[in-house]
Structure formats: structure tokens, C-alpha cells
Image (tube, rainbow, N blue to C red):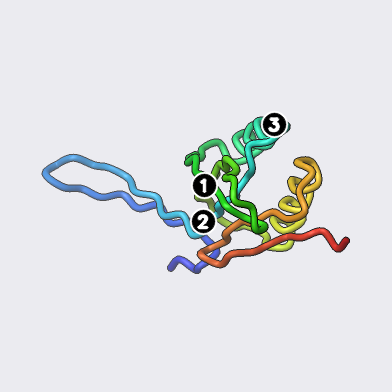
Amino acid sequence: MNTPNQSSTKNHTKNEKIYKIKIFNDSIKFYLPRVEGYNDIIKDITLKYGALSIFEFDGYFEGKFEPTKYIRVEIHTNDVNTEKMIEFANEVRIKLKQKSLAFEFNNNLILVESDN
């Protein structure tokens, strides 16, 4: 039996064709501003997780009237350590020289902010 922290791979047969499905339990979405260094962060995430999707959007945050270009980096994986993910998000925030950085973990929005 699968527990919530284990991945699920199943073999199926339909019309004499065998195929596999995989179920990923964890979904992570980072909201990265397109500032100097963001490409390096995307490369790091790609090397760690192997696959991701990227969406670009305009964001109006911190009371600004001019939009900022953002990238949403979405990862689906298994067995994520929440505390390590928060620490990673804070490291990303510092590398990108941001006051805050948002990411979603399993549909919960987490905002990592500077204490200054």
C-alpha cells in the first residue's frame, strides 16, 4: 500500500498495450523575479529535479504600478523536506537580492521575507 510520502508507479494493460503511470505527491512552484541571477537558479533547480515547467507573467507587488516580469518554476516530485525547501527559498531570495520570495508547496503559499 502506498503512503502519502511514497511515489506510486503502476503498470497497466489496456488493449494488450502495457504502460506505466507515476504519481508525484509534492508540487512546488517558485515565483522568481526576472532579475540578474534568476537563470542560475533555474539551472540549479533543473539539475536537482531534472524536469520542470516555466511560465512567465507580469507581477504587481509591493504597491508598484509598473509590472515586474516573473517566472513561475513548477516542479513535481516526491519526499520533499519542507524545512529544507524553506531554507532553499531563503537562499534564492538572498541570491536574487529580494526582500521576499514566494513559493507554493502543495497548494500552500509560503512567503520568505527578510527580517530587516
- The residue shown at (49%, 68%) is 3
List x then y, in percent, for residue 15.
Answer: 11, 44
What amino acid does circle 1 point to? Answer: Glu
Cβ–Cβ under 8 Å for marks 3 and 2: no
Q: As rendered, which of 42 and 93 lies closer to the eye? A: 93
Tag 1 residue = 74
Three-letter amino acid code at the position of disc 3: Asp
Say which residue label 3 marks. 40
How far is the residue under mark 1 from the one under mark 3?
Answer: 16 Å
Secondary element at tag 1:
strand
> How far, Cα to Cα, is label 2 from label 1?
7 Å
Residue 37 position in % (x across, y down): 72, 32
Q: How many marks?
A: 3
Q: CA distance from mark 3 to mark 2?
A: 21 Å
Q: Are marks 2 and 1 in contact (CB under 8 Å)?
A: yes
Q: Which residue is mark 2?
A: 27
Question: Going from the N terminus, do you reach mark 2 or mark 1 first?
Answer: 2
